[in-house]
Every structure is written in structure tokens, then in C-alpha cells.
């Protein structure tokens, strides 16, 4: 259990998912978490669990050791300006806001506290996020504290800040890409005889197992594919048909198109 108080500014999709993840992982008790948004009615479930819910950003950050900024990019200037004077140099601010750099945040805040960027995904609600982290020469003890927090919510990796947009595509948008792949498999499964519920279970667990093989064995996907493809068999026939129809090419093009979009914005 952490002894840290955490303030989550912006209790939307990601902010609430992080609050849930922090409690499920037992990183923090509900009483150690404060979460804010203007429409607090939408946070009643967290309030019922004992999380401190309010729309007072200044009060929330004052008593926090770690502040998680979970608002939209266009809200950053207003919210940071509002909380700026309530922050102190012993706190750590972690921004999950896409496309807003550490130097932009520093320029608005003008407070000498440690600033991190984090790019988690929505699986953070069940402590299965992949979170990419970046900082600007923060001391090791603060880096360790932030890595420790996100490792409780899945896995994390420190990357250079210039790769944060790429991390957004592959890590955060990646959840949607994976879901579409899974959905297509379910549709195929229904066509060959399963009801939707059974197909969904088979596909989701199969995809989870495939990913776990790579994570636990450290193998390359093609090594695992080789184990499944019998010469002249059904797996290679299906795989090659998918490739003739552009499976890999379509995924790579989709990822680069998403990246072009984020890089342009
Ligand atoms: N969703 C993802 O998978 C994901 C992954 C990685 C990073 N991100 C990034 O995380 C950020 C949040 O994304 P999201 O999907 O969680 O967005 P969201 O659901 O719109 O959440 C943003 C929240 O901020 C609140 N808010 C707005 N102004 C506020 C203020 N002045 N004070 C306090 N709260 C305020 C909004 O609630 P009220 O309107 O009620 O105030 C809203 O609940 C974005 O920058 C996004 O790019 C998202």
C-alpha cells in the first residue's frame, strides 16, 4: 500500500479508469484519492467507494503528493493556470494529456516541481495498461516512484519525450486497433458456427494467450506462428489468404495514418 495522496484532475474516461485501477491494484485506498470534474454527479460511483469527489481543483492538489492531469489538451492552459499557485516543489505532476509537452506545461506553471508525461491505455482500469513514460531529467527517486505507480497498473517503459506521439498511436489507439481485430475474428467465428458469446470468449482468450506467449517467452511473433503452421495445413492457408488481402499492410498503413494525424494536430 502506498502512503501517497493522489489527486486526479479530470474525472473522465481515463481519470476514472486510473482511480479504479489504483484501488483494484491496492496501490492506494479510496481515502487517498481525490478526483475532480465540473459535473461531479457523474462521479457518484467513485464517491460511493470512498473516493473524495469535488470540482475544486485547487483544494484537491494542495493535499496531494502526486497529481495526475487527465483533461483534454484544450483545457490544459485554464486548469494549470488555476492550480499553479496551489502546487509545491515536493509534488510530482503526471500529465496523460496527449500532444502537450513537458516544456509547455512548465511554461504555464512556473512552479519548480517534477513533471512527467504518461501515455497509458484504458486497460489501466483493470491494471493491465501499457504505459509509456517520459520526463525531463527528473531525479531517480521520482522516476522510480512514477514507474512503481504505473507498474502497479500494468507495465511501463520510459521513452524519450519525442516518441510520446508514437506511443499514443501504438499504445493508446492500439486498444481500438486490437478490438477491431478481435471483433473481426468473432464475426468469422459466428460464420463458421459459434454463437456470439462463445466466439467472443474463444477469440478474446486466444488473443490474450498469444500476447502472453510473447511477453513471457520473449519470442518473436513469427517463431510462435511457425509452431502453429503445419505444412499444407489450414493455418497457413488462412494466414496467406489474409495477407493476400492486405492484413499486415492494412495494419501498418492504419498506424502510420494515425501517426500522420497526431503529428499534424
Ligand atoms: N482515453 C484514452 O485511452 C487515453 C489514453 C491516453 C491518454 N489520453 C488522454 O487523456 C486525456 C483525457 O482523456 P479522456 O478520454 O479521459 O477525456 P474525457 O473523458 O473528456 O475526460 C476529461 C475530463 O476533464 C474534465 N474537466 C474538464 N474541465 C475541467 C476542469 N476545469 N476541472 C476539472 N475537470 C475538468 C471533464 O469533466 P467535466 O466536463 O464534468 O468538467 C472530463 O470528465 C486526454 O488528453 C487524452 O488525450 C486518453
Image (cartoon, rainbow, N blue to C red):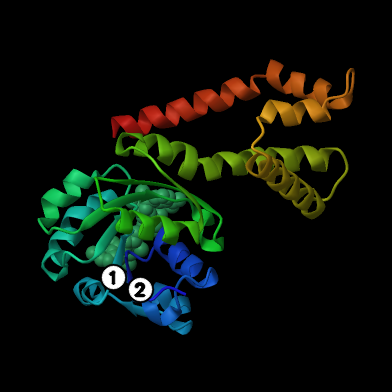
Label 1 vs label 2: CA separation?
A: 6 Å
The image quarter containing residue 190 is: top right
Q: Residue at x 13, y 58 (%)?
A: 112
Ligand 1 within 8 Å of disc 2? The answer is: no
Ligand 1 falls in quadrant: bottom left
Query: Are discs 1 and 2 less than 8 Å apart at CB?
Result: yes
Q: Residue at x 64, y 24 (%)?
A: 247
The image quarter containing residue 40 is: bottom left
- In the rendering, at what x and y percent does residue 230 appear? 88, 24
Q: Residue at x 24, y 54 (%)?
A: 115
Please state which of residues 143 and 233 is positioned toward the viewer in this rendering. 143
Please state which of residues 56 and 171 is positioned toward the viewer in this rendering. 171
Tell me which label, 1 or 2, sits earlier in the chain: 2
Residue 240 showing in the rendered view = yes
The image quarter containing residue 183 is: top right
Please state which of residues 59 and 132 is positioned toward the viewer in this rendering. 132
The residue under label 1 is 65
Q: Image height check: is 26 above or below 227?
A: below
- In the rendering, at what x and y percent does residue 132 appear? 42, 45
Number of other residues with Cα within 10 Å of mark 2, as a class: few under 14, some 14 to 19, many 20 or more? some
- In the rendering, at what x and y percent does residue 34 appear? 34, 75
- In the rendering, at what x and y percent does residue 83 appear? 17, 66
Residue 13 showing in the rendered view = no
| Residue 4: numbered disc | 2
Label 2's element?
loop
Left or right? Give the position of 191 relative to 133.
right
Label 1's element?
loop
Number of other residues with Cα within 10 Å of mark 1, as a class: few under 14, some 14 to 19, many 20 or more? some
Q: Residue at x 12, y 49 (%)?
A: 107
Q: Image height check: is 99 above or below 205?
A: above
Amino acid at each position: 500500500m502506498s502512503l501517497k495522496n493522489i489527486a486526479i484532475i479530470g474525472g473522465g474516461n481515463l481519470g476514472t479508469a486510473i482511480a479504479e485501477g489504483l484501488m483494484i491494484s491496492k496501490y492506494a485506498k479510496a481515502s487517498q484519492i481525490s478526483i475532480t470534474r465540473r459535473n461531479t454527479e457523474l462521479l457518484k460511483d467513485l464517491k460511493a467507494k470512498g473516493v473524495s469527489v469535488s470540482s475544486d481543483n485547487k483544494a484537491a492538489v494542495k493535499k496531494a503528493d502526486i497529481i495526475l492531469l487527465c483533461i483534454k489538451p484544450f483545457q490544459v492552459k485554464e486548469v494549470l493556470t488555476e492550480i499553479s499557485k496551489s502546487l509545491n516543489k515536493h509534488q510530482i505532476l503526471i500529465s496523460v494529456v496527449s500532444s502537450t509537452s513537458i516544456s509547455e506545461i512548465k511554461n504555464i506553471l512556473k512552479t519548480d516541481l517534477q513533471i512527467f508525461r504518461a501515455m497509458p491505455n484504458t486497460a489501466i482500469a483493470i491494471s493491465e495498461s501499457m504505459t509509456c513514460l517520459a520526463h525531463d531529467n527528473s531525479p531517480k527517486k521520482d522516476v522510480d516512484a512514477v514507474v512503481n505507480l504505473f507498474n502497479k497498473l500494468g507495465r511501463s517503459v520510459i521513452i524519450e519525450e519525442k516518441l510520446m506521439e508514437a506511443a499514443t498511436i501504438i499504445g493508446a489507439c492500439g486498444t481500438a486497433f486490437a478490438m477491431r481485430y478481435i471483433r473481426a475474428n468473432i464475426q468469422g467465428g459466428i460464420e463458421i458456427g459459434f454463437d456470439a458469446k462463445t466466439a467472443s470468449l474463444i477469440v478474446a482468450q486466444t488473443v490474450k494467450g498469444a500476447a502472453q506467449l510473447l511477453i513471457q517467452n520473449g519470442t518473436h511473433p513469427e517463431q510462435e506462428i511457425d509452431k502453429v503452421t503445419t505444412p499444407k495445413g489450414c493455418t497457413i492457408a488462412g494466414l496467406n489468404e489474409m495477407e493476400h488481402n492486405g492484413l499486415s499492410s492494412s495494419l501498418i498503413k492504419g498506424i502510420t495514418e494515425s501517426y500522420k494525424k497526431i503529428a499534424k494536430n
